[in-house]
Image (cartoon, rainbow, N blue to C red):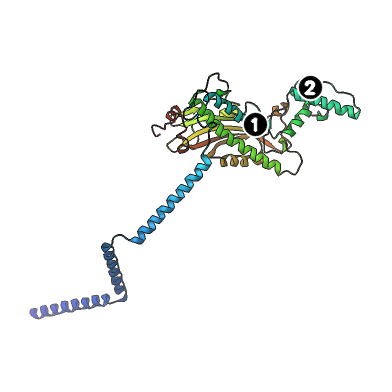
Amino acid sequence: MRPFRRHLQSLGYAILALSSLVLALSGMISTSVQQEMQRRAAVQNWIAELSIDPQNAGTIAAELARIGQFEAECAATWSCAGRIGRREPLLADVFPAPHRLTAGFEFSEAYEHALARLLSQLAAGEPPNEVEVAAAQVELAAQRAARGEPPDAAPRASPASIAPASAPQYDPWLWACVQKARRIRCYVSKDSLHISPIVDGNQAPGPAEMWCAQVGLWIQQDVVAAIAGLNHETVASDDRSHTGVEHSAVKRLVALRIVGYETARGLWPIPIRTSPGPPACAGRIVPRSFTTRVCNAQRDVVRFALVVVVDQRDLLALLDRICQQGFYQCVGASYASTPPEDAAAGYLYGPEPVVRATLDFEAYLLRAHFRELMPTYVAGRLGHESGD
C-alpha cells in the first residue's frame, strides 16, 4: 500500500505543477501582459537608439534656444536698469579725480546753481518777508483810498499777533501771505534741501567731498522731480483759475536730508552744511531698516529722509512718484496734523485736509554704473576693493 500511496502523491504533485504552468502561460498571453512586454521592448529600443547616438539634436537645440532667450531677457533688463539708474555728474572731468586744479571750485559753483534750479523747478518760495509785507501795506492803502476809506495803521510787527478774525484786505501781513501763496506752488525754505559743506569752503573740495555732494544732488533731483510732477498734475486737473499752494498736492517741503551710505560696518554719514534738520527728520533714522540691505557687490545703499506737508489724499501718490524716479524704496512712514505755528508763520495750505509726513527711503545705486566714477577713498570705505 505504501508504494501505491507514494505514486499517488507524485501524480498529485505533477498535476498541481502542470496546473500552475498552465495558469502562468495563460497569464503571459493576456492582453495586459502583452502590452507591458511591448512597452518594455519599446523602452529598450529607445535606450538602444540613445546609446547609438547620445547627442539628441532636438534637445540640444531647444536648450540652446532657452539659454539664448534667457540671455536676451537679462540684457534687456540690464539695459532698462541702466536707463533708470544711470546718472551723469555735474562736470565730466572731476571723477574719480579732477584733471585740473580749478576743478573743485568749478564743481562747487555748478553745485550751487543746480540747487537753485531745484527751487525753480518747484516754483518754490517762503512766507512773505518784511519787504513784501510793506508792499502789501502800500497796495491795501491804495485800495482803501480808491474806496474812500481812511488809511489804516502800520502793518503788524510780528506774524504771531495775527488774529483769526482778521480780514486779509485790512491786514497787510495776511494780504501778503495770501498773495504769496497764490504766486508759488510749494513752500521751501533755504535750508530745506541738503546742502553740502563744499559751498562754504575757501579751499577746493577733494574728490570724496565732491562725490558725496554729487550723490546727494542726484537723489534730491529725483525727489524734486517727483514733487514737481505731482504738483503740476494736481494743479492742471483743477478747473479753478488759481494755481498756487492751495491746489498743489505737496504744500511744503520741510526738509530733505541725505543721511548716508548703509555699509556692513555701519552708517557712513554724508556731510551737510547745516544741522540734520527738524527732529522728525533725524529721529526716524535707525542703524538698519527692515530690509537689512547694505552696500554689496551689486549696489550701494544710501539712506535719505523727507518731511513734507501734503494733501492727505495724495500721500500714496507721492510715495509712488518718488519710487518711480529710480531704485528707491520707502522703509518708514509716519504722519501727523500740521502744528498751529505754521499758520502763524505765514504758511497757508488751503481748506483741504493736510498732514505733515515723515518718510524714510533707501536708494540703490548700481555699482556697475558708478564704479569707474567713484573716487578711490570712497570705494574703499564702501568695500569695493574687498568685494563686500
List the residue tagged with mark 1.
Answer: 119
Q: Identify the image quadrant of the C terminus.
A: top left
Spot occupied by residue 197 in the image (x, y as percentages of width and height): 55, 23
Spot the residue most to the right.
Answer: 148
- Secondary structure of residue under mark 1: helix
Spot occupied by residue 177 in the image (x, y as percentages of width and height): 75, 29
Could you tell whether 239 is left or right of 205 in the image?
right
- Secondary structure of residue under mark 2: loop
Residue located at (54% from left, 38% from top): 328
The amino acid sitting under disc 1 is Leu
The answer to whether the residues at label 1 and label 2 have Cβ atoms under 8 Å apart is: no
Q: Which mark is on residue 156?
A: 2
Residue located at (75% from left, 38% from top): 242
Above or below, comparing residue 75 to residue 228 in the picture: below
The amino acid sitting under disc 2 is Arg
Spot occupied by residue 265 in the image (x, y as percentages of width and height): 43, 29
